[in-house]
Image (cartoon, rainbow, N blue to C red):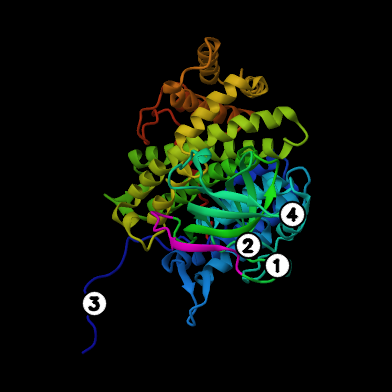
Amino acid sequence: MPPTTTHEVDNQPPEFAPRDLWRDDVALRAAVAHAGADRFAGRIAAYGALAGRDLYAAGFDANRDRPRLRTHDRFGHRIDTVEFHPAYHQLMDAAIGYGVAGLSWAEPVTGAHVARAALAYLHHQAEAGTSCPLTMTHAAVPVLRRAPALQPWIDRIVACRYDPRDVPMADKAGVTLGMGMTEKQGGSDVRANTTRATPRADGLYALRGHKWFFSAPMSDGFLVLAQADGGIGCFLMPRRLPDGALNGFRLMRLKDKLGDWSNASSEIEFDDALASPVGAPGRGVATILEMVMLTRLDCMLAGAAQMRMALAQAVHHTRHRRAFGRALIEQPLMRNVLADLAIEWEAALAFSMRVAAAVDAAPRDPDAAAFARLATAVGKYWICRRAPAFVNEAQECLGGAGYVEESILPRLYRQAPLNSIWEGSGNVQCLDVLRALSREPAVVDALWREIDRGRGLHPGFDAAADALQGILGGGVPGEAQARRLVEWLALLLQGAALLQAAHPLAGEFCASRLGAQHALAFGTLQTDCDFDLVLPRVLPEAGRA
């Protein structure tokens, strides 16, 4: 009997992808140009097209078939291997080849950090889990530079080659780096770590202990904190020893995480694992903090990328879905929600790219370094705090369809909280801001210079800046008020970034976020907001590749 047709399928949007994520993103293109990274525009454009086509599709496969731990081979040999879906390797190969992990160091010219930030932002939209090893590999270079003997590791990072083979570093075309900081008893308090590093006659150390959260366990090397004579030290532990033998560690299990499914995280035990010292003895925490400015920036970029993809999905859906006689995007309340989300995303992206430009200039400009020191903590706190609520609001624009795994929204929603926890929770970021404002005069000076660049361009911004000056004039607030202060700093610095760039939405942002014209929920813009200016910037009508 032939099948019968029970109904016609209509009023459904077309597939979102393939799309050109660079061509669609007018805000990113403007930010790259404003930050002086136009020389890399061709590379970024090519990656944006790839990310919205092949990598977007690969992201679904990499998350559907999660990594698997194999502790032993079929003969009983200990192998401690993590197996990934081929899509994971496809994603890593593309990202590393285009420079997501190494461009800043491979081509150290003005704008390289900005270009790498743009590449990381595009990659994260397609697939977020692989951003973990990419970020750690990129951020490890300044730390590795403290030990000249580790230059071969740096050489393989800057080669921008992905080599997934499980062989010694010397035999590889390129390497990736993971990290092991957290232990059961300490969490963020790494000074409570109990893993011991015992010196050997050959200059190496033997590690014995555990890590409760060990990131990217199939990496070629790992930066590890351990107690040594004189205090906590930083060490580079290779996965494979020069003779090809597996180093002295055991992967106990993989973490069953809320999100970040494509990438593995693990628990590990060290059994006289050999490692090289990095940095001065007893200065492991200070050494590893050299990564923080870079990893926090990537958390900001990740939050902005999640906002971007969630909003693009929402606009795509509401543009094609009709209800009550007209497209959803034409309905006033929906327009308010989408425009509000758009302003939030554009501010997050503008601030992130402004910080990327400061990181880029930091080696040459002490003021830029001081600003980046503060802004990465402020931005990580605020953008990562906003991302989960933002993604959920975008989900709601799709209704039930946004809660179904066949769309990307559930994956974005699971992923969104991660960056508020990774690299230090919100409280850690806020306490760090208080510490910087209290103890580092250069940071305070850099803050006011940045804010002063926005003065005179919007009355709401000026009033908010005056209010902050009044607060800090009485001294840095106590810990209990830290979140309130950092939120205010974040809004001001976002406003300053938009105003300095003469961004077309700077006025809408300052009026709504700094001018007390906004309620607590998204979709509460005043009726004088120019929705016809805001919404067309999100997604070109004919943008599908």
- Residue that badge 4 annotates: 150
The amino acid beneath tag 2 is Asp
Question: Residue 460, relative to residue 159: is it above or below?
Answer: above
Q: Earlier in the sequence, mark 1 or mark 4?
A: 4
Residue lying farthest bottom? 1
For label 1, the crowd category at 10 Å Cα-Cα, with few meaning under 14, some 14 to 19 and many 20 or more, is some
| Point 36% across, 46% down: residue | 392
**Mark number displayed over residue 5:** 3
The amino acid beneath tag 1 is Pro
Q: Per the image, is 249 magenta?
A: yes
**Label 2's element?**
loop
- The answer to whether the residues at label 4 and label 3 have Cβ atoms under 8 Å apart is no
| Point 47% across, 52% down: residue | 213
- Residue that badge 2 annotates: 220
- Residue that badge 1 annotates: 242
Q: Which residues are magenta?
A: 246-259
Could you tell me residue 12's position as x and y percent?
A: 35, 61
The amino acid beneath tag 3 is Thr
For label 2, the crowd category at 10 Å Cα-Cα, with few meaning under 14, some 14 to 19 and many 20 or more, is many
Q: Earlier in the sequence, mark 2 or mark 1?
A: 2
Residue lying farthest front? 201
Is 422 on the left-hand or right-hand side of 448? left
Q: Is residue 21 visible?
A: no
